[in-house]
Amino acid sequence: MLGDNSTISELLSNPIGFDVIYKILLQMGKSISLVDNFVIRRLKIKHIKFFLKGKLGEDFFYSLYELLNQEGTIEHSEKDEISRKWWKEAVFYQIYPKSFKDSNGDGIGDLKGITLKLDYLKALGVDALWLCPIYDSPLDDNGYDIRDYKKVLKEFGTMEDFDNLVTELKKRNMRIILDLVVNHTSDEHEWFKKALADKNSKYHDYYIFKPNEGRAPNNWVSFFSGSAWRYVEQTDEYSLRLFSSKQMDLNWENENVRKEVEDIVTFWRNKGIDGFRLDVINYISKNSFNDGNETIGKLMEFYGVENYFFGKHLHDYLRELKKNAFGEMFSVGETPGVGFEMSRLLSGEKRGELDTVFLFDHLETPGHVRFDDYHYDLNYLKKYYVDMYAHLTTEDWPSLFFENHDNPRMISKVSPKEEHRKNIGKLIATFMLTLRGTPFIYQGQELGLINQNFEKIEDFRDVESINKYEELICQGVKEDEAIHILLAGSRDHARTCMPWSDGFTTGKPWIMSYSTINIDDKSEIEDKDSIYNWYKKLIALRKDSKTLVYGRVRFPSNKKKNYFSYYREDEERSFFIEINLSDKRIKRVEKISGYELMLSSGANNEYMEPYEVSIYKKSLSNR
Ligand code: TEU
Ligand code: CA
């Protein structure tokens, strides 16, 4: 058991310990090497406490030990062969249905609209779709507040439309995964309505209720502003809601809840889907309802998060769900706050829990959060990926993504300059499609979309942004400053309508249609030098040789700033990828011989253009 007399070395060999220390240093803009060295490793935690007294009180260490001692260390066994799986070879494409394609002119994307665009996706080289929630919902959080798990949202169409989409996908040898949102339900779900109607009904224990003692049960805050507790007048209680006030957390300690989730998974599995993305799945096990530690709350932005971001029953619940419902179906967990070592506990091949996870530490550079207005320094990715692959073994398989429906467009994070957009778009594609892991392209990323020019609060639709705006105004922030903060991090940047040459809709779109730059799918397809055609060529390269899927990753130890290179190798061939991480022209560093240039976004001379990527290949056998 870890405690004050444990050494820093013992702390770092605990997966949660390593990730927590890594994350704290990351938020402070420091590197893990600050503690992961011979001198510090021999110190005892009580020595550190002495230096940090006043900053990290006793309760911080109590919370930390509580968290750490629920896990043992995890072996780093290294078997040679990486097991072959369809979901390791597949290129995924994430669709936000509401903004993808509207087929009936009501201004809202729908399932028939997705079916209309399957040939576009097939031509790009997409193997599998991930659809954000398509279930009946009051749309408080655009479908992440589910009212009926077995009913298609009427605005998106009918179950027949869904069945037809699956049929059309199978005709094209494509797959589909759905979004499983089971940390919480809508407050309009029949379970919650029954829970309020009768405190003694079995449904009352489906949720997390606490008696009203005059104030919220603890200091936890919601990810969507305000207290994480909603006062429920009907029963004079507080009910937990980590997200919007219409998204009520489920009580996973209740076996009936877990059985309901198994039933939902089985229902959609029987409809022919290939798996699920599991929404904030690492939040489902709550360790306690103690107040959140002040320091951790400030550091992680949300008070209370240490009590639920990796609860002690999480592994039990995931193993049970896989055994009783998922079986061999694919699962990718969305795990905000989880780091490399903890991800191995959740998705290591022998763990019997998840197949892979979405980690998020690469989406902002150290010391920044999503709503900070800053330029993303791509040199951070060099450090991030070298660290990541140093931790992962052949039994671990990462996901590779830079955008989704919760984040601004990555090109805009790096640079606002149109002159760099194309090369940055190709650079991002290259990381996703040539590193080892499963790539997830987010709708519009293949077109090089950038952030939207929202002007006023009425232009926004996302509950997180609207609540944040109101919170900022209440704090005395001026309107234009509040809009500036939203523009840095609003999820709505990723939710504007796809700019199809044949139009997103014939009606009035539910959100501003895409307007920041004048491109559409037709112009990008016709432009041989477009980001779209870079994705298409890279995906074809990846399919052509499994080297870019299963090959070893090797990073030459060059420390030159702004330059990043790596090899992907197996017995048959070697790929060499070199990247200019900056907006300056730089000299190439790595000397290579015998390689053939396959793709370059530069001029192929001794200097690399700003944000240039060049990809080379060498055959190692005459096969
Ligand atoms: O996102 C959870 C999540 O990690 C982000 O919402 C993040 O916590 C938040 O933006 C604060 O930074 C999932 C879904 O992807 C998101 O769309 C939902 O709003 C959320 O869960 C609730 O279901
Ligand atoms: Ca529609």
Image (spheres, grey):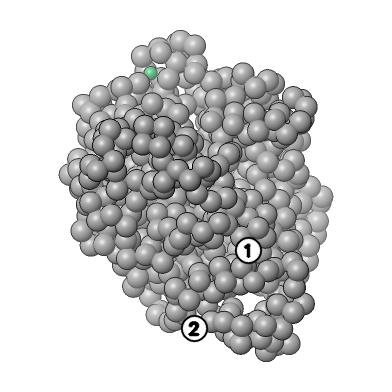
Q: Which one is earlier in the sequence, the residue at label 2 or at label 1?
A: 2
Tell me which amino acid carries mark 1.
Lys
Relative vertical location of residue 267 with respect to residue 33 in this rendering, above or below: above
For image coordinates 50% across by 69% down, the residue present is 67
Q: Is residue 605 left or right of residue 515?
A: right
The residue where tag 2 is placed is 1
Residue farthest toward the front in the current orientation of the protein: 213
Q: Nearer the viewer, residue 362 or 504?
A: 362
The residue at 65%/22% (across/down) is 457
Image coords of residue 536 (percent x, y): 49, 42
Task: Please state which amino acid type lies under the numbered disc 2.
Answer: Met
Q: Secondary structure at mark 1?
A: helix
Q: Residue at x 56, y 46 (%)?
A: 221
Name the one closer to the observer, 351 or 46: 46
Q: Where is residue 301 shown, x and y percent of the image?
A: 64, 51
- Residue drawn at (74%, 61%) of the image: 29
- For the C terminus, give its image quadrant: bottom left
Around disc 2, counting alpha carbons within 10 Å, would you say few (fewer than 14), some (14 to 19), or many (20 or more)? few
For label 1, count other residues whose C-alpha is less than 10 Å away and answer few (under 14), some (14-19) or many (20+): many
Q: Is residue 12 above or below residue 238?
A: below
> x%, y% of residue 203?
26, 43
- Is 62 in front, or is 120? 62
- Quadrant hosting ligand 2: top left
The picture places residue 91, in percent across and down from the top left corner, at 42, 49
Q: Is residue 170 left or right of residue 214?
A: left
Q: Mark 1 = which residue?
A: 23
* Mark 2–mark 1 distance (CA, rounded to whole Å): 22 Å
Q: Quadrant of residue 171?
A: top left
Total number of numbered labels? 2
